[in-house]
Amino acid sequence: NQATGFIALGLFKDYEEIRNWPKQFGEVMPGDIKYKDINGDGVIDDNDKVPMKLTSDPAYTYSFTLGFNYKNFGFRALFYGVAGVEKRTSFLWEFPYDYDMAWPESLERWHWNNVNANRPRLSMKNTAHIRESSTYGLMDASYFRLKTLELSYDIKAEVLRRFVGINNMQVYVNGNNLFTITSFDNRIDPESGGSGSYPLTRRYNMGFRLTF
């Protein structure tokens, strides 16, 4: 679905800038997000919302596999990725539900000694006017991921077939979700995109397969 929102133009640096800006909803203070007055009427309201460039549904998905066998060795890899997708995350705000939840990124917030910051001021209040849907709240959620990787070795021993009835034993090691390349918030899996989802796990396995 096509999302709409305000165009964010940075943060207010001081009260003088707020006074000279089109009237914006909420209790606006320095360090809050300033929005573009699209229709030029001097008031920031719902009439200034525009369609977002991208949507939460990927415009492109792709995958490819690599594999080969050499003598008794085997190699398999599956890569997967999406492109043309943007998502919003609550981790952009430290106190989304009015309780303590600060992050190392909190140090990068706006304050009077950091007026050129890119992240809004901290607030324990429900500052809804800076959490509006906007270009600030959207992040590129495109990613490229190594989903699975496996190395294997086939053991075809005559003694196994003669005395145990096993025609082939394959020993393998594999891994899932070994790495992801993305510009999305590194605290969240870009595939789920939600702060309430379980973190993506990286798994390693060892085992063997028998052919009778």
Image: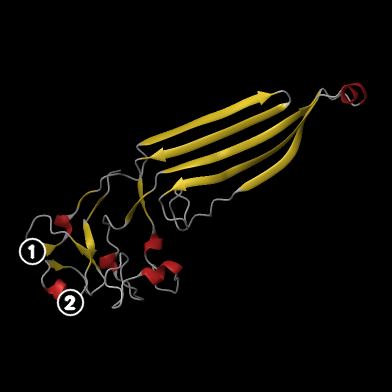
Mark 2 vs 1, N-terminal side: 2
Q: Secondary structure at mark 2?
A: helix
Q: Amino acid at mark 1?
A: Gly
Q: How many marks?
A: 2
Question: Is residue 191 visible in this depiction of the protein?
Answer: no
Q: CA distance from mark 2 to mark 1?
A: 17 Å
State the residue at coordinates (35%, 70%). Answer: 109
- For disc 1, the marked residue is 42
Residue 62: where, in percent of width, then height?
A: 44, 33
Front tag of 2 and 1: 2
Mark 1: give few (<14), some (14-19) or many (20+) Cα within 10 Å.
few
- For disc 2, the marked residue is 15
Q: Amino acid at mark 2?
A: Tyr
Mark 2: give few (<14), some (14-19) or many (20+) Cα within 10 Å.
few
State the residue at coordinates (22%, 72%). Answer: 13
Residue 186: where, in percent of width, then height?
A: 46, 55
Callouts 2 and 1 close, C-beta under 8 Å: no
State the residue at coordinates (53%, 54%). Answer: 199
User: Residue 210: which quarter of the image?
Assistant: top right
Relative horizontal placement of residue 142, taking residue 120 as reference (left or right):
right
**Placement of the C terminus among the 4 image quadrants:** top right
Q: Nearer the viewer, residue 118 or 193?
A: 118
